[in-house]
Image: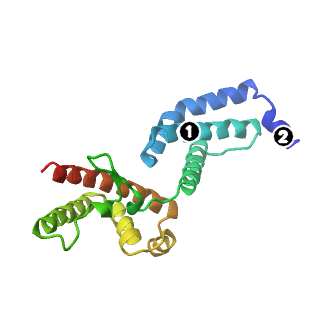
């Protein structure tokens, strides 16, 4: 009997109610999802999933008291599911393209400590760029990046210490890594052209 509720077509009143809700909430919901996710395709996928869930809820005659809050809760849950599917990426896992076309790990780009004064200078430039990039990023991204990469804490340990959800921590680290990668690529390119 429950299966029939999901497959039964919506009546005119249900269709009107869904259209009204979608018209009223779609833009605000999309903007909120866009602030949570960087990939526009993921934003649209999540938005469509939420709207499909709304239609299914109306078809199943599930009562929804505060539709706006319900939509955002469903969107948050879909985003959480998306982040759970993604594997966290360590900075060392990010490859950096060299001018010669090779792809290298970031630590391979640092000059050896015993390679002489020029190498020490270059290493210093890279370390300064790393520090500047870390200082320039939002504090919440920097803190989770340092706790995970430098202190070696798991996301679960960071969550227990801070009270911040694991998925939020994963997202913050993801954005920190992207920012660092972009900034360090620029300094690497500059050094190679000297």
Q: In this view, does 41 lie to the left or right of 94?
A: right
Q: Which comes sooner in the sequence, label 1 or label 2? A: 2
165 or 126: which is nearer to us? 126
In percent of width and height, residue 117 lies at: 10, 69
Task: Please tell me whether mark 1 or mark 2 is closer to you in this view.
Answer: 1
- Residue underneath mark 2: 3
In percent of width and height, residue 51 lies at: 61, 37
Alpha carbons under labels 1 and 2: distance apart:
25 Å
In percent of width and height, residue 139 lies at: 31, 63
Which mark, by number, is residue 156? none
Per the image, label 2 sits on a secondary structure element best described as: helix
Name the residue rendered at 78%, 37% in the picture. 6
Specify the farthest residue to the top. Answer: 12
Name the residue rendered at 21%, 53% in the picture. 187
Is residue 139 at all visible to an observer of this figure?
A: no
118 or 21: which is nearer to us? 118
Q: In this view, does 157 lie to the left or right of 194?
A: right
Quarter of the image with the N terminus in it = top right
Q: In this view, does 188 lie to the left or right of 174?
A: left
- Residue underneath mark 1: 45
41 or 91: which is nearer to us? 91
In the rendered view, how is the structure colored? rainbow
Q: In which quarter of the image is residue 90?
A: bottom left
Per the image, label 1 sits on a secondary structure element best described as: helix
In percent of width and height, residue 191 lies at: 17, 53
């Amino acid at each position: 009997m429950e299966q029939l509720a999901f497959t039964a077509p919506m009546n005119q009143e249900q269709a009107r109610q869904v259209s009204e809700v979608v018209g009223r909430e779609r833009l605000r919901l999309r903007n909120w999802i866009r602030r949570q996710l960087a990939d526009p395709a993921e934003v649209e996928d999540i938005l469509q999933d939420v709207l499909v869930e709304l239609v299914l809820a109306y078809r199943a005659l599930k009562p929804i008291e505060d539709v706006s809050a319900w939509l955002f809760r469903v969107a948050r849950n879909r985003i959480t599911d998306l982040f759970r599917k993604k594997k966290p990426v360590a900075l060392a896992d990010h490859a950096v393209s060299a001018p010669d076309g090779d792809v290298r790990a970031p630590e391979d780009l640092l000059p050896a400590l015993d390679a002489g004064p020029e190498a020490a200078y270059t290493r210093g430039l890279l370390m300064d760029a790393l520090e500047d990039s870390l200082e320039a990023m939002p504090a919440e991204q920097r803190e989770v990046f340092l706790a995970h990469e430098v202190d070696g804490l798991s996301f679960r340990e960071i969550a227990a210490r801070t009270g911040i959800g694991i998925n939020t921590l994963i997202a913050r680290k993801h954005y920190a890594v992207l920012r660092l990668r972009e900034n360090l690529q620029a300094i690497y390119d500059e050094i190679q052209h000297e």
